[in-house]
Image (cartoon, rainbow, N blue to C red):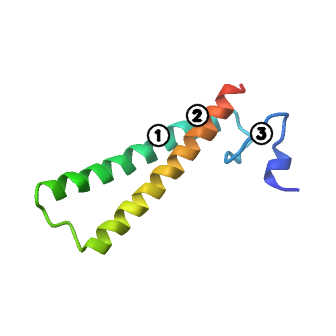
Amino acid sequence: MGCADALDDGRRRSLLLAGSEAWPYFGFVGGAVYVYFAGRGILARVTMQRRGLRIGKPTNVKLAYALLAIWGVMGGATLFAAVVNLGGS
């Protein structure tokens, strides 16, 4: 029996593994923080490049953009899961 089976109370709790009713709220706030900092990191690097500051080797900058984008997608998925679970409450 997996975590999802143990927590099934008639609603699907994707990505939220705790049985507490407070976890969708924590997921909502945490997802928003992830999206905010991913966007802030990307925009900061774009702004620094436009101002002519050297922020690293091109391969390292691409890697930073990729990792920040993945971070933002993870935050978006957590936000989505929280909104779906809050909508069912």
- N-terminal of the pair, mark 3 or mark 1, is 3
Where residue 72 appears, as percent x and y from the top left, is 46, 50
Badge 3: residue crowd in 10 Å (few <14, some 14–19, many ≥20): some
User: Mark 3 — residue?
Assistant: 12
Element under disc 2: helix
Q: Which mark is residue 52?
A: none
Which label is found at residue 32?
A: 1
State left or right for residue 1 relative to residue 20: right
Contact between marks 3 and 2 (CB within 8 A): the answer is: no
The three-letter amino acid code for the residue at tag 1 is: Ala
- Residue drawn at (52%, 44%) of the image: 76
Instruction: Report the front residue among 87 and 2.
Output: 87
* Front residue of 50 and 36: 50
Q: Which of marks 1 and 2 is nearer the N terminus?
A: 2
Give the CA distance from mark 3 to mark 1: 21 Å
How busy is the neighbourhood of tag 1: few (under 14 within 10 Å), some, or many (20 plus)? some
Say the numbered circle drawn on residue 25.
Answer: 2
Relative placement, left or right, of 67 versus 83 is left
As drawn, is 21 to the left or to the right of 29? right
Mark whose residue sits in front, 1 or 2: 1
Mark 1 element type: helix
Residue drawn at x 45%, y 47% as measured from the top left: 34
How crowded pointer 2 is (Cα within 10 Å; few <14, some 14-19, many 20+) is rated as some
| Of marks 3 and 2, the one in the foreground | 3
Pinpoint residue 46: horizontal percent, then vertical percent.
Answer: 24, 54
Residue appearing at x 39%, y 51% in the figure: 38
C-alpha distance separating marks 3 and 2:
16 Å
What kind of residue is marked 3? Arg
